[in-house]
Image: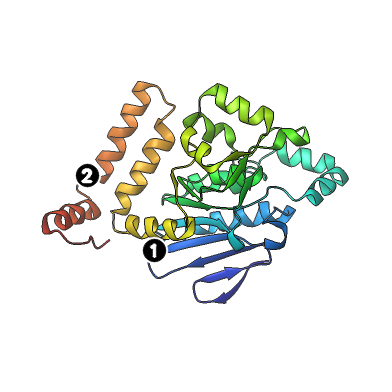
Amino acid sequence: MLHATNEGTVMNDIVTLSTDDLGIATVTLNRPEKKNAWALDTFRMLGEIGDGLKSQDGLRAVILTGADGCFSSGIDLAVFGEFSRRMEDIRAQMRNPPPGEVANHFQKPVTVWSELSVPVIAAIQGVCFGAGMQLALGADFRLAAPDTKFSIMESRWGLIPDMGITRSLPKLLRADQAKELMMTGRIFSGPEAHEMGLVTRLTDDPLAAAQEMAKGLVGQSPDALSGAKALVDQAWLMDAPQSLSLEALLQSEILGSPNQAEAVAASLQKRPGKY
């Protein structure tokens, strides 16, 4: 159950949400004693938080992070025990998304971030394994400490990664790279993740860097940011007629809008935009 703790902050035992006066929301996995491993409720809470942010007035950016200097060690082993006790129910949830949804209950906490029109930044350090890795891949940007350890390790448990990874990895890796990481489940470093293209930037303080990046993005027209996100997310894997048509549609909606006019005025007057 979520509950308000003070203005701009919502918490439960395993996830926290805070929003500052610039409209930057920070979603934190909050099980530090378990290296922020996912409990069964983590799936539901992340999906609900993401859905709630879609209608939050003044939202300009989202940061995903983990408590106490660790992003996430993946699914808590206790969850597998729960799965074994409810196998048919779990299988039914996997095969049958909720009404009106494309993603199932276990995919939603990753795919929901692509449904937001604002930039989503993952601030990653410590370990980023399994479900945590898939959550990070659901963000628009990934800022990571060089000593972060990464792994798509579902194969170690005889499973496949199934939380929207078919939408994220094809835009980032070659097919052979994706297969190698998924099949071996090996642990790899921050520099290797950056070299492959899984990490946007390496930084010693990912959360501070994410906050700085988010503040910079707040200074841009929200229409331009949402349009750029939609263009890449929707058109990257389209054929030419579809992608060119989407470019034209998005630009025709933005051109001449109040935010676009303000962006021009701010650039000409060499001042921050007021959106």
Quadrant of the rendered structure where residue 244 is?
top left
Q: Is residue 93 above or below residue 242?
A: below
Disc 2: CA contacts within 10 A as few (<14), some (14-19) or many (>=20): few
- Residue 216 coordinates in the image, percent (x, y): 32, 57
Residue 190 on image: x %, y %? 53, 43
Classify 10 Å Cα crowding around label 1: few (below 14), some (14-19), many (20 and above).
few
The residue labelled by disc 2 is 255
Q: Which residue is mark 1?
A: 58
The structure residue drawn at horizontal position 43% and vertical position 34%, both measured from the top left corner, is 234
Residue 223 image point, x, y percent? 31, 50
Q: In the rendered structure, which amino acid carries the disc numbered 2?
A: Leu
Residue 133 shown left or right of residue 121 in the figure: right
Q: Which mark is residue 203?
A: none
Residue at point 47% right, 35% down?
195
Q: Position of residue 128 (x, y in %)?
A: 61, 47
- Position above or below: 207 against 90: below
Nearer to me, 42 or 28:
28
- Which comes sooner in the sequence, label 2 or label 1? 1
Residue at the spot 44% in from the left edge and 56% down from the top edge: 210
What separation in Å lies between label 2 and label 1 (alpha carbons)? Answer: 21 Å
Residue 31 seen in this snapshot = no
